[in-house]
Image (cartoon, grey):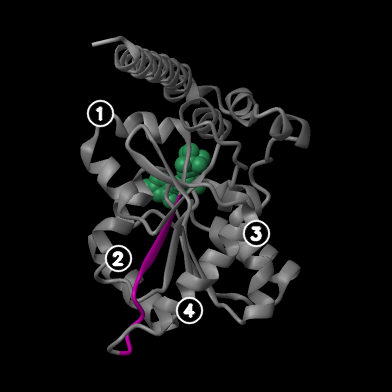
Amino acid sequence: MAEMEILGAKISDYDMVETVCSAAALIDVGRQAAGGEPMLHQIVTLNAEILYKAQTDERLLAVINQAELVTPDGSGIVMAAQKLCNRQIERVTGIDLMQELCRQSAACGWQIYLLGAKPGVAEQAGQNLRDQYGSLICGCHDGYFNEDEQAWIIGEINEKKPDILFVGLGAPRQEFWIAENRSRLRVPLVIGVGGCFDVISGNLKRAPQVFQRLGLEWLWRLLKEPWRFGRMMALPRFAMLVNRQAKAKKRLAEANQRQMTDGRREKKLPQ
Ligand code: UDP
């Protein structure tokens, strides 16, 4: 896989088509694991807010880096890839990836379990997905449960044998939840999708296309959910951090270049 390292996180440069192919391969490999039990693979859809948080949370960075695939979800990551790695990459957001995998499910025969959001929301999202793509949802549960209920839910997920488990508990809670339950879940592919069930169920409107195209989805969310202001302060901080790193990288490259030129000049000098 073509990977870039951005602020300590290994992020894929795959576009949507390549990401879906890679997800399909992870499902196949997970299904064919030795011993008969599916082996879990994880995809993280990473945005700037969470990557910024991971700068001061080693455990979170480790959880991100243990995923088999990390997609660039958000214009902040796309900007960082350009500035720090000189790479033009495409956003692969959680909601687009989820929709795309659901669309592929019909052809591939994948079954899907939805875990997360307030009671009734995952059911409604599941119903809307069934209406759109056929009978791909094998189960769903809300995201508000205690330890005892959690054991029951994991049992149910394993019994239903989904190919893909979408976990919508919000980031980074869902990434920690997946990491903590890796050894208990018998699912080939698990993906954290934040508030996607709220959007797919119709309870929350996604940013209009124009906001998405301009990379301003965060502004739409801020207008709709002003309580996000505190959390969103991570975005300008992330941009400043990326700029500082880009300048430091440039200075280092210039210093190396100077050293090489001086070295060449010295070699040419008569003994
Ligand atoms: N949520 C949940 N259980 C919890 C806390 C949150 O299922 O204990 C759900 C919440 O109902 C919402 C989603 O997690 O559907 C969080 O959405 P948000 O948009 O905040 O997440 P993000 O997309 O920013 O990661």
The answer to whether the residue labelled 3 contacts the one labelled 2, judged by CB atoms less than 8 Å apart, is no
1 and 3 marks in contact (CB < 8 Å) = no
Kindly identify which residue carries mark 4.
Answer: 28
Q: Which amino acid does label 2 sit on?
A: Glu
Give above or below for 268 relative to 132: above
Question: Which SS class for mark 2?
Answer: helix
The tag earlier along the polypeptide, 1 or 2, is 1
Q: Distance between the residues labelled 2 and 4?
A: 30 Å
Q: Which amino acid does label 3 sit on?
A: Val
Give the amino acid at mark 4. Answer: Asp
User: Could you say where residue 2 lies in the image, as x and y percent from the top left?
Assistant: 48, 51
Pinpoint residue 186: horizontal percent, then vertical percent: 34, 76
The residue that disc 3 covers is: 17
Whether the magenta-drawn stretch holds residue 39 is answered as yes
Q: Which of marks 3 and 2 is nearer the N terminus?
A: 3
- Residue labelled 4 has its Cβ within 8 Å of some atom of ligand 1: no
Q: What secondary structure is marked by label 1?
A: loop
Q: Earlier in the sequence, mark 2 or mark 4?
A: 4
